Amino acid sequence: MVEQQSASVRVATLLAACDGGPRRELRSLAPEAISRRVSASAVKESLKQLKRWSRDGLLVLAVDDAAFPPLLREIPDPPLLLFLRGDVSCLTRPAVAVVGSRRASSAGLRIAHDMAGALAEAGVTVVSGLASGIDAAAHAGALAANGRTIAVLGSGLHQVYPASNRPLAERIVTGDGLLISEYAPEVRPRRHHFPERNRIISGLCEAVVVVEASEQSGSLITARLALEQGRDVLAVPGSIHNPNSAGCHRLIRDGAALIDGVSTLMQELGLDGPVPDSPPAAWAPVWHALTVEPMDAERVSQVLSLALPEVLLALAELEVRGFVATGADGYSRRCPQPSSGPRR
C-alpha cells in the first residue's frame, strides 16, 4: 500500500515512528516540505517498520489514502497517519460518539450503555476513547447489542491504556469493531495524547453525546472540538448535586441538545429505534405508580411499599429508556413515541 515514491505517505510513515515535539512541529508543514528533511535511510527503516506492523495485523492509513475517513480528513488538524486494528468497514458507517467521565456514577454508566446499545441497534457505529467509566460502558453497550464500535486510543495499539480495559479492546476487535491510534504501536500513553486524540473521536462522527462530565472533564474538550468541526453536540442532564453533571449542564446552557432518554436521543439524531409500547416487566409497577404529575421517589416507595434503593434503580432504568421524565419536582410518567425516520 505504501510506496517509496509517494512523498506524503512516506513522510507520514516516518512520523509514525516519532512522538511528541517532532510530530507536532512537522504536522503543519506540507508533505513535500517535510520530505526534503527526510533521509533515504530513515525512509528505508520506516518501510521495514511498516512491514513488521502489517505482520502484526495492523493496517496503516495515510491522510491522502483513499480509504482514510473523509469526515476526519476535513477537520482543521487531521492526523497524518492512522493505525488500525479490526474491521475497517466500521469507518464507512454513520458514527456517533458517546463520551463522559472516567469516574461515572452507576446511573451514568447505565445511561451510556443503553444509549450506545440503541445507536448500535439502529446501525450507527459508536465511537469512544476506551477510557474507564462512560467510554467503556459505551463500547460495552454497542457490543451487547451486536453492533459496531470504534475505540480511539491515546497510546499505540500495542500499549492499550488503561490496562484494565485490554480485555475490552480484544472484545472490540473480535466483535467486528475497530481500534484506532495516530501513534506508533509501541508508543506509551502520555498526558497530552488524550486531548489530542479527542479531535479524532469527534472528527470521525456526525454527533457527540456527553453523558456525564465535570467542569474540568476532557469530554468538554471533545464537545468543543465537535462544535469547531461543525458536529452536533448533545448532553444528558443530571442532578444538580452531582459534580459530574456540571459540565453537561454548561453544554446545555450553551446550546447543546438536552437528551432525557433513549427516545429523545433517537429523535434528535433522526434515527429509527426500537421503542417498546410498555416498560420491562421488572419495572412496570414503578411506572404504573407514576402519573403525569411529578412524584418524588420517596412517595413512590411508600405507595408500592418498596425499598427506596430499588425504586431509584427502577426510575433510573425507566428514565434511560424514555418511560419516565424527571424534573425539579420529581418523576412523571411518559409514553415515548417512535421517531419518524432517518433525517439523513
Image (cartoon, rainbow, N blue to C red):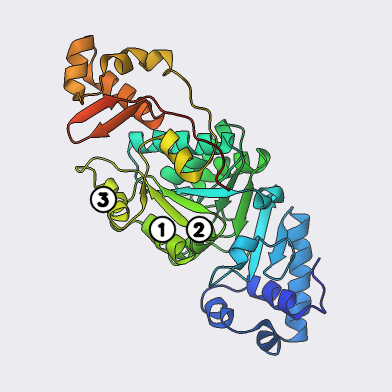
Please, what is the three-letter code of the amino acid marked with disc 1? Ala
Q: Secondary structure at mark 1?
A: helix
Nearest the viewer among 275 and 3 is 275
Q: Is residue 8 above or below residue 286?
A: below
Nearest the viewer among 307 and 265 is 265
Q: CA distance from mark 2 to mark 3?
A: 21 Å
Nearest the viewer among 159 and 277 is 277
Would you say 52 lies left or right of 112 here? right
Nearest the viewer among 133 and 295 is 295
Q: Specify the quadrant of the image occupied by residue 251.
A: bottom left
Q: Position of residue 342 (x, y in %)?
A: 57, 41
Q: Position of residue 190 (x, y in %)?
A: 47, 64
Q: Is residue 171 above or below residue 293?
A: below
Give the mark nearest the N terminus, 1 or 2. Answer: 2
Give the mark nearest the N terminus, 3 or 1. Answer: 1
Q: Which mark is residue 199?
A: none
Q: Which residue is mark 2?
A: 202
Q: Which residue is mark 1?
A: 223
Q: Are marks 1 and 2 in contact (CB under 8 Å)?
A: yes
Q: CA distance from mark 1 to mark 2?
A: 8 Å
Rendered-image quadrant of the N terminus? bottom right
Give the mark nearest the N terminus, 2 or 3. Answer: 2
Q: Position of residue 178 (x, y in %)?
A: 64, 48
Please, what is the three-letter code of the amino acid marked with disc 2? Ser
Please, what is the three-letter code of the amino acid marked with disc 3? Ala
Q: Which mark is residue 246?
A: 3
Determine if residue 15 is in view: yes
